[in-house]
Every structure is written in C-alpha cells, then in structure tokens.
Image: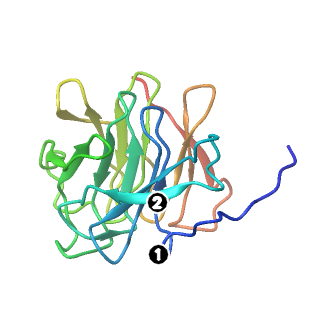
Amino acid sequence: MAGTWTPLTNQPPFPASTMLPSQTAPSSLRNPEENAGLRLSPDQHGSYIHGAWSPQSSMANTRLYYASAVLDDGRVFVAGGEYSDAGGDTTGRTFQPGTRPVVTSSTPAGWNNIGDAPCTVLPDGRLLLGSIFDQRTAIYDPATNAWTAGPNKDDPSSEETWTLLPDETVLSAECSSIPKPKNMLPLPISG
C-alpha cells in the first residue's frame, strides 16, 4: 500500500506524544510534559490537514510512555506511565473525549506498577494489559469495570507494542531475553 504524508497546516504547540483516533470524536493528542491534551477537529470542508486544535480535558497525572487505547464505546483508556508525576502510576482511567478522567478499578490484582506496559483492545471489547515486570497479563472489562487475570506470556511486556491480528491473536514484538529464535510471537487471548 503506497501513501504519502502531508504536514498539518496548523501544527500542535507542543511535541506530539500519543495520538488517539476515535469513532465518536475527532482525534486527540496528549502533551507528555503536562496532563493536558488537544483535540484536532476538521475544517468546514472535513479536512484535518487544515483543521484546528482545541483544548481537551486534562488527565489526572502527567504521563509519558503509557498504555492507552480507544475502547469500543469511544471512551479512552490510559494506565501507567514510565515517567509520571504519580511515579509508576498503577491507576487505570477511562474518559469520554472532552470530559474529565474517571477512575476505573485501581489496578489488576497483585500489580504494584504499570509503567510503560502495552495494551490492546480485544475483539469482544475487553482490554488486554501486559506486565512490565513478569509474564502476567490482565483483562479489563469496560462493561463491568473489573480486572481478571489473563494468559501468561513467555517474557515481561516492558517496552512492547501489541497489535490485534485478523485471526484474533495479539502480536507482540518481544523486547526482553533477545535474541532468541522466534522473537515475534502471537499471544493467545482465549482459554
């Protein structure tokens, strides 16, 4: 698939960090140095290239390198932060773009730190979160606001990015214990 990049006419006023697209609201961009964010809205012709930035709700804490995802209902999920004014913040938060974050459950059972752990939304709308210190994963259910234990990986998840594949497995580019013969492993999410 060929494509090109086109710079925005109106650049954001801070270095880009995490950008989260949403089906229910324009894209949002977080400032890694502050707990504030901006929303990119299209111009009157529907062009984001000529769009405008407007203030968005603040997160409860500053975060840089953290788990984030857009849930099926349009809410944004954030947790952790390798660099945060809350330390290795373990609190997960969800919020509707444009509103203040609300605390979800405090942390997966037995987890003391989330840090820069990866996450991905599963086909059924739940969210899979990896542990940065060991092989555990946890699953957050937005419908019940509860965490359950997920399947174990063969290594910690620190510094990883996860991608949901069409066959409903999660692709993990492992960042610890390398090199090893197979460092790209699908993580089973059922059973």
- Vertical side of 31 occupied by 168: above or below: above
- Asked which secondary structure carries label 2, the reply is strand
Q: Residues within 10 Å of mark 1 (few under 14, many from 20)?
A: few
**Image point 19% across, 59% down: which residue?**
90
- Asked which secondary structure carries label 1, the reply is loop
Amino acid type shown at disc 1 = Pro
- Vertical side of 170 occupied by 172: above or below: below
Q: Is residue 83 or residue 40 the one in the foreground?
A: 40
Q: Is residue 105 or residue 70 the one in the foreground?
A: 70
Q: State which quadrant residue 190 falls in.
A: top left
Q: Is residue 18 left or right of residue 10?
A: left
Residue extending farthest to the front is: 44
Where's the N terminus, which quadrant? top right
User: Which label belongs to residue 13?
Assistant: 1
Q: Are marks 1 and 2 in contact (CB under 8 Å)?
A: yes
Amino acid type shown at disc 2 = Trp
Earlier in the chain: of badge 1 and badge 2, it is 1
Residue 52 coordinates in the image, percent (x, y)? 51, 57
Q: Is residue 97 left or right of residue 103?
A: right
Q: Is residue 28 or residue 141 the one in the foreground?
A: 28
Residue 23 coordinates in the image, percent (x, y)? 48, 32
Where's the C terminus, which quadrant? top left
Query: On the image, numbered disc 2 is attached to which residue?
Result: 53
Q: State which quadrant residue 118 falls in.
A: bottom left
